């Protein structure tokens, strides 16, 4: 990306929409002034997950990113995208009321539907197809993956400000609902602010700032820059959501205070702990390591409870949940326990869903897995050894610097018993060093220490080389 900053004032005027709709803080208030937001996540923020997250404190939830071109064109993949990413046939997605159980009323509102696109007309057609089922439509300007580079969408539109303006402005002028946008930052604070101002000028009524650059992905993810988020917030006249570094409940509270943003969005943190935004959970997590303490206030954090509840929602919905979404969620929810009970990983990895029978029958293999894990965790909870921090922490406890240096260990503990939901720490990115043949061979990391800082990707954990266990379903 070049260092030249385009002149924002040289862009066209925003223009007057053809339909009356809420703008800026009026839109924000109509959404309930959300502070805790679940991010759009491909194949992960599906309806069942959105319902679960709302039950545990999420004020606003986005759909998965939807490819606008595939959504509107009749071609290969259209049916899968329409059924799995935003299904309008059943009538549950975007519904104000859902009756899934006797003791509560669920809802899929407020809801923002996110699209990726590089053609204004195609984007408008897709957005018009969903505008009656959501509160706003969001443009993805943050996806950094190779598929986005090949398709020229997401973060790879950062090189074409004119196109970004036209995409947003087309929705602003023609949709019945407001348009929002989620974007990544540049290395330059000044350019990040200018980009955000251009997006605002185009007609976006809320923006989400992901405090990482386009290059920060995969093993190069690193930490998001909260200072750039704060600078963007101070420069705009519309609501701003902050996105990045939200691993514990205290993180989103600190992020709001530091950045001054109107809300905080979580993606990966939410996937590993969907109770992250639960306001009624106790803040002193250190008591989880005290077997004599009263743990009742932390019951929502018990991963077995969440796994069962998620399966309950999947089973009761008429809207199908994709097998890949279901499996992905179950691996992330139960990850701490599977670090101990490794023989159950292939059981989960080999679990299938079925098309016959009622919803519960269709997910029977997943339910059987959770029941088996539940029996083991009940036994583990009676063992004092699991309440004590081990001398060598599991892979996912290699915390980033802002967690390692945290003074308040009660709200950001570096050890939590494995039957509770907890964050997954990506290993810090260390740029490759030039080879020095004269270097002392003893300075090279040994295999064991290297293992600690390079944990396996969650997507590769389904088939480890361990003894297989058969579970009757």
Image (cartoon, helix red, strand yellow):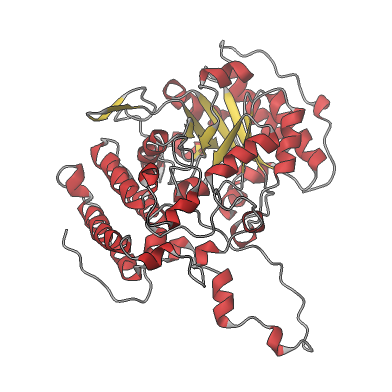
x, y percent for residue 301: 40, 47
x, y percent for residue 454: 56, 69
Tell me what residue is drawn at x 78 percent, y 34 percent: 194
Q: Nearer the viewer, residue 214 or 154?
A: 214
Q: Nearer the viewer, residue 392 or 285?
A: 285
**Could you tell me how many numbered marks the image carries?**
0
Q: Nearer the viewer, residue 227 or 385?
A: 385
- Most distant residue in the front direction: 292
Q: Is residue 299 left or right of residue 165?
A: left
Quadrant location of the C terminus?
Answer: bottom left
x, y percent for residue 418: 40, 60
Q: Is residue 355 visible?
A: no
Q: Is residue 131 visible?
A: yes
Q: Relative to 274, does residue 100 appear above or below in the rendering?
A: above
x, y percent for residue 455: 52, 68
Q: Relative to 164, does residue 390 appear above or below in the rendering?
A: below
Tell me what residue is drawn at x 59 percent, y 60 percent: 399
Q: Relative to 305, does residue 202 appear above or below in the rendering?
A: above
Picture quarter containing residue 254?
A: top right
Tell me what residue is drawn at x 61 percent, y 48 percent: 245
Q: In this view, does 187 lie to the left or right of 178?
A: right
Tell me what residue is drawn at x 67 percent, y 23 percent: 238
């Amino acid at each position: 990306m070049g260092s030249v900053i385009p002149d924002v004032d040289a862009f066209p005027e925003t223009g007057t929409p053809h339909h009356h709709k809420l703008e800026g803080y009026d839109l924000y208030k109509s959404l309930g002034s959300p502070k805790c937001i679940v991010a759009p996540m491909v194949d992960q923020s599906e309806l069942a997950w959105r319902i679960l997250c709302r039950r545990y404190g999420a004020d606003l939830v986005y759909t998965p990113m939807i490819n606008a071109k595939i959504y509107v064109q009749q071609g290969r993949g259209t049916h899968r995208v329409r059924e799995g990413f935003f299904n309008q046939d059943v009538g549950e997605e975007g519904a104000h009321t859902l009756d899934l159980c006797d003791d509560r009323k669920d809802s899929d509102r407020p809801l923002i539907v996110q699209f990726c696109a590089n053609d204004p007309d195609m984007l408008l057609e897709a957005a018009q197809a969903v505008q009656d089922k959501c509160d706003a439509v969001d443009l993805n300007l943050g996806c950094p993956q190779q598929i986005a580079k090949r398709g020229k969408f997401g973060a790879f539109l950062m090189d074409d400000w004119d196109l970004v303006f036209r995409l947003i402005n087309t929705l602003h002028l023609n949709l019945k609902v407001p348009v929002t946008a989620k974007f990544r930052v540049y290395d330059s604070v000044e350019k990040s602010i200018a980009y955000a101002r251009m997006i605002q000028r185009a007609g976006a009524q809320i923006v989400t700032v992901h405090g990482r650059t386009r290059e920060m992905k995969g093993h190069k993810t690193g930490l998001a820059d909260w200072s750039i988020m704060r600078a963007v917030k101070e420069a705009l006249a519309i609501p701003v959501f902050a996105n990045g570094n939200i691993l514990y409940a205290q993180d989103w509270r600190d992020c709001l205070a530091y950045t001054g943003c109107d809300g905080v969005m979580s993606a990966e943190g939410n996937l590993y702990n969907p109770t992250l935004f639960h306001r009624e959970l106790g803040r002193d997590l250190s008591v989880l390591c005290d077997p004599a303490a009263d743990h009742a206030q932390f019951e929502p954090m018990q991963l077995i409870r969440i796994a069962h509840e998620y399966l309950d929602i999947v089973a009761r919905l008429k809207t199908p949940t994709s097998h890949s979404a279901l499996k992905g969620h179950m691996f992330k929810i139960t990850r701490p326990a599977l670090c101990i009970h490794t023989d159950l990983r292939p059981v989960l990895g080999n679990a299938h869903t079925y098309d016959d029978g009622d919803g519960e029958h269709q997910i029977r293999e997943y339910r059987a897995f959770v029941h088996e894990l539940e029996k083991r965790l009940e036994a583990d909870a009676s063992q004092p050894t699991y309440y004590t921090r081990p001398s060598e922490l599991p892979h996912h406890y290699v915390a980033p610097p802002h967690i390692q240096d945290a003074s308040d260990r009660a709200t950001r503990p570096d050890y939590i018993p494995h039957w509770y939901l907890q964050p997954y720490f990506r290993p810090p990115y260390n740029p490759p060093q030039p080879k020095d043949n004269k270097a002392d061979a003893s300075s090279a990391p040994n295999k064991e220490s290297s293992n600690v800082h390079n944990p396996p990707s969650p997507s590769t954990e389904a088939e480890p080389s361990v003894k297989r266990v058969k579970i009757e379903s």
